[in-house]
Amino acid sequence: MPFLPVRRRARQAARTLLLSGSIMLLPAATGAAPAGTSGADRADILITGGTIYDGGTGKPYVGDVALKGDRIVYVGRAAPMQAAQRIDAKGMIVAPGFIDAHTHADGFLRSSDAAERVNPAWLDQGVSTVVIGVDGYGTPDVGADAAKIEASGVGTNFIPFVGFGAVRQRVLGQDARAPNAQELSAMKALVAKGMCEGATGFSAGLFYAPQSFAKTDEVIAVAREAAVRGGLYDTHQRDESSYSIGLLGSVREAIEIGKKAGMPVHFAHLKALGVDVQGQAPAVIAEIDAARKAGHDVTADQYPWLASGSSLDASLLPRWAVDGGGDALLKRLDDATTLARIRREMAENMRRRGGAKSLLLIAQGFPWTGKTLEEVATQWQLDPRDAALRIIRQSVEKDAGRGTAVASFNMAQADVDLLMRQPWMVTSSDGSNGHPRMFATFPEKYVRYVRDRKVIDLGTFVRQSTGRTADIYRIDHRGYLRPGYYADVVVIDPARYAPRADYMHPRELSVGVAKLFVNGALAVSDSQATGTTAGRALLRPTPAHCPPE
């Protein structure tokens, strides 16, 4: 596929979107307030007397925040203005709307159900912006996809990535092979297209097939197309455990990809997963700190749960078994010799996960929902591997994989605590169906790690959920309470802010958000989403190395 024509089509699509007015391309960050945001202006909304955490590193203080239209027009101790509406925030926390650094909110944002597109799972946590297209799943058709989502009406802002998995699958399908020169060129062109249409960066999920089939050099070659256009490398690294190259080997690989491609590296949901690597957080931190000291921009996000969310097939099946997709897997399971090999390797994968008792089946609406794999195996009088294969087979044949979701209890508390304290760490949910992290990550972190266990303080919690995240993703005029910034503002009752979702009831909405404004519109009032769809696609301005109009 010739490179230039693809870029020309991408630019043409972006121009069409701009002319339609459906996508807002933000100006480059300058920190200057736009015209018409003088503190002397009359405000629409005045939030008074709250304890202000502005997203930065300064100390909190009691003061006022004024909003006018979709902008903040005043932040300080006493607003010199009147307002159409006043909100008494005495005793409340006033902060920038939270930014979730890694989500699978795509399903909500693309839903045919208007109530789901409001995105209450995130809004009721105080989240105003979600990052999507992660783990390599982001479509290269960034412009058209963003326009469609925004036009349908959504409750949160969203930031798209273009994904290695989506690109590789479009060109190579599910095959476990390297691309030839023409195929590599096509993959690179798709990444360039996504970046030219406003993606923030390039995401990869090298743990997952078919991305796992790619060698490091292939990832570097494709990632460079994002790098030359100012993109960030966001990675679900190849191994968070001991499946292939090991946790530390995988950390080094990710940093190498960033260095050789020439781009910042961001580790998604950083963790030490499984019995073989628990306790390795200090070594992971040392690798990242060494890279940063050498001048490489390396950061990470993390969710505050001891159980990861995955699927039985990703957790237990060897990667070679899924080469070619579901139909190829079923053929291998029907061959006695191949099945015996799969079962042998599944035993080792189950061990590193902590055994069948550590895998909680969380897919909703199935007979096994809410049971551990060990419990299901006992009920069916099967070896846990065979119980898992029965679920996987049924899901491939009938449910498109829906029934295989698991919460895998595989992390050590000491590792989670230590990673959370790092100055380059921010908050993410990795929110996916069946795991409470989708509905409860931010209040869970507040209650468990700030209020109860005091692993971090409140100022760090807010910064890890707002300004630091905005800095990493270079989100223009968001993440801070500053005049001229967009009016994404949350007011939290610290006595009531809490999760309601748990592993048995993963879809319970959180409580304690008194008010949440998204682009100046009231999105949550007294822990209830208002139904307002003020969310926007936050696309980056057209970078260099894109075709002219």
Image (cartoon, grey):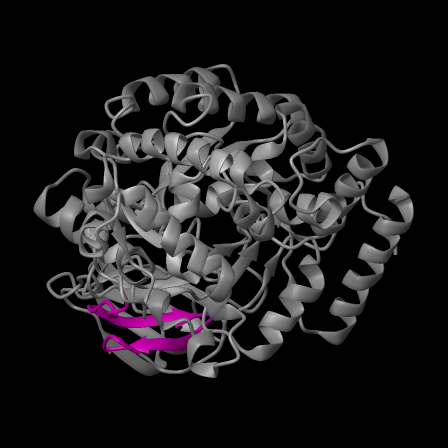
Is residue 508 on the magenta stretch? yes
The N terminus: image quadrant: top right
- Picture coordinates of residue 162, whole percent (x, y): 63, 49
Query: What is the x, y in percent for residue 32?
Result: 55, 52
Quarter of the image for the C terminus: give it: bottom right
Q: Which residues are magenta?
A: 507-528
How many labels were placed on the picture?
0
Above or below, 126 against 407 in this view is: below
Q: Nearer the viewer, residue 353 or 327?
A: 327
Q: Nearer the viewer, residue 362 or 145?
A: 362
Instruction: Report whether residue 236 is seen.
Output: no
Which residue is at a point 56% across and 52% down the rendered structure image?
Answer: 326
Residue 488, by quadrant, is bottom left
Q: Is residue 484 above or below residue 337?
A: below
Residue depicted at x 41% and y 27%: 243
Image position of 270 with respect to 24: above or below: above
Is residue 156 found inside the magenta-colored segment of the image? no
